[in-house]
Amino acid sequence: MDSEELAARLAAGGWTLRDEGGDADVVVVNTCGFIQAAKQESIDELLAAADSGAKVAAVGCLAERYGTELAAELPEAQVLSFDDYADIAQRLDDVLAGRSRPAHVARDRRTLLPVSPVSRQRSRGATPDLTDLPDGVAPASGPPVVRKRLAGGVTAPLKIASGCDRRCSFCAIPSFRGAFVSRRPHELLAEAEWLAARGVRELLLVSENSTSYGKDLGDLRLLETVLPELAKTDRIDWVRVSYLQPAEVRPGLIDVMTSTPGVVPYFDLSFQHASGPVLRRMRRFGDRARFTDLIERVRALSPDAGVRSNFIVGFPGEAAEDLRELELFLSEARLDAIGIFGYSDEDGTEAATFDDAGKQAEDEIARRVSEFADIADEVMAQRAADRVGETVEVLIEEVLGDGRFEGRAAHQAPDVDGSTTLLADRPLVPGDLVTARVEGSVGADLVARECHL
């Protein structure tokens, strides 16, 4: 989403965007600053861009999070802040002309808005007015977005909020993304229509915490109202919600997500672990029993609902009984998609200050990741096999040839979950929504044949 905002602002400012690998005067690298592997990948991209001979600008989370530190380590790049986005075309004019600007000093962006969520909307400032936008650029639509699609496809993310108010002990994201701010419903509906007019058939609602949507607008149940309205958008077949906090999933939200036509019954639940003691150290809610109960409530209303989650292993103080709790939960919960990640210290987080005596060695964390990744693969494969015989709707994304098409069923989110190979005896195109019966599975992936009910 940040890349599409930057692309729109640059196009509006007179810059011509080149395809990756094409000749460019300035290369803009949108960095990630969340985990060590992503940080290193961002640095490698910056170095590769500098080797191309072009001027380089670093934007995104790594640039925001480290500011002057990154600039000192990588003098090849001009390091820009989120605050530079509104004037990004001018900033690149400066980069091209060799006019160096001091890198920003990193700060805790949570301090930039009032502590009270309902006071933030008045403090966020007006979105800059962009006139005479090039074709294909969405109009300004609230914090913080103008937009130009950088890739085709029938699915597109739609940012509903930015920032996070939670204080998980392992996570630094709130400090550099800032406090939670919702976009207003009319902005979301306008952007949904804009995306639909450009061939999008599925909206993926994204934020750092979708279950908090509306709390700064004075309505904590606003998502339950907005979802049906988004689903009514002409030419939009599916609306999918990402990143739900289990502690904030309300019965009314479950009802809307399992009963509203066009809203897929898909629950991306941020469990992170299943052991109560580990979750307390993470500054999070829940345990195996509570999480199992939540999933059972979802499946009581929608037996075929998709459920995915991510888990961290190797957290400081994680003991054998904690791992056993996690293993039991994974075996009982029958999740469709599971991500397993190893813990690593993150600058500025509470967990990074924990007593070293409770921390795991890197090789032990890697062993736990490998063990639980195998368990996750087994669970996902079994869950997919259980779906054989089900009737599903498949959104077509790619034509493979010989009557074969690649797509996704409602329980499969784009990029992060499995996919469905559809067999059909008629021509289909990306964006078609086809009723099919599942005939087989391969790992987390399905094989289905079009059926005529």
Image (spheres, grey):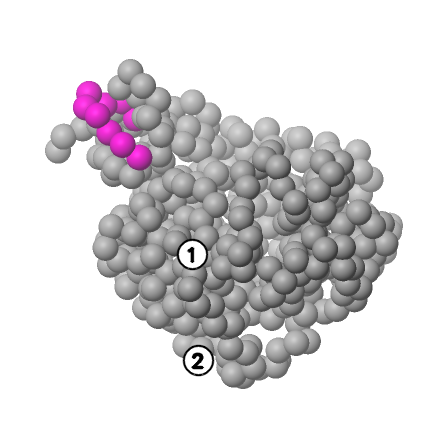
How packed is label 2: few (under 14 Cα within 10 Å), some, or many (20 or more)?
A: few
Residue in the picture at 33% in, 26% down: 399
Camera-side residue of 278 and 189: 189
Q: Distance between the Cα atoms at labels 1 and 2?
A: 36 Å
Read off the residue under disc 1. 134
Count the marks: how many? 2
- SS of the residue at dot 2? loop
Give the residue at the far left of this rendering. Answer: 453
Residue displayed at 76% across by 50% down: 77
Which residue is located at x 51 percent, y 55 percent? 11
Give the residue displayed 80% in from the left and 53% down from the top.
70
User: Position of 62 compared to 403: left or right?
Assistant: right
Query: Which mark, by number, is residue 94?
Result: none
Is residue 442 something one can see in this rendering? yes
Q: Amino acid at mark 2?
A: Gly
Check disc 1 and give the amino acid type: Pro
Residue 390 appears in the rendering:
no
Which comes sooner in the sequence, label 1 or label 2? 1
Q: Nearer the viewer, mark 1 or mark 2?
A: 1
- Say whether residue 386 is left or right of residue 246: left
Please rate how many residues cluster around mark 1, counting C-alpha atoms within 10 Å: few if below 14, some from 14 to 19, many from 20. some
Q: Position of residue 253 (x, y in %)?
A: 36, 63
Quarter of the rendering containing residue 109: bottom right
Residue 447, relative to residue 24: is it above or below?
above
Q: Which residue is mark 2?
A: 218
Q: Is residue 112 left or right of residue 317?
A: left
Which of 261/88 is in front?
Answer: 88
**What's the magenta region?**
422-430
Rendered position, 154 above or below 214: above
Residue 322 percent coordinates (x, y): 66, 46
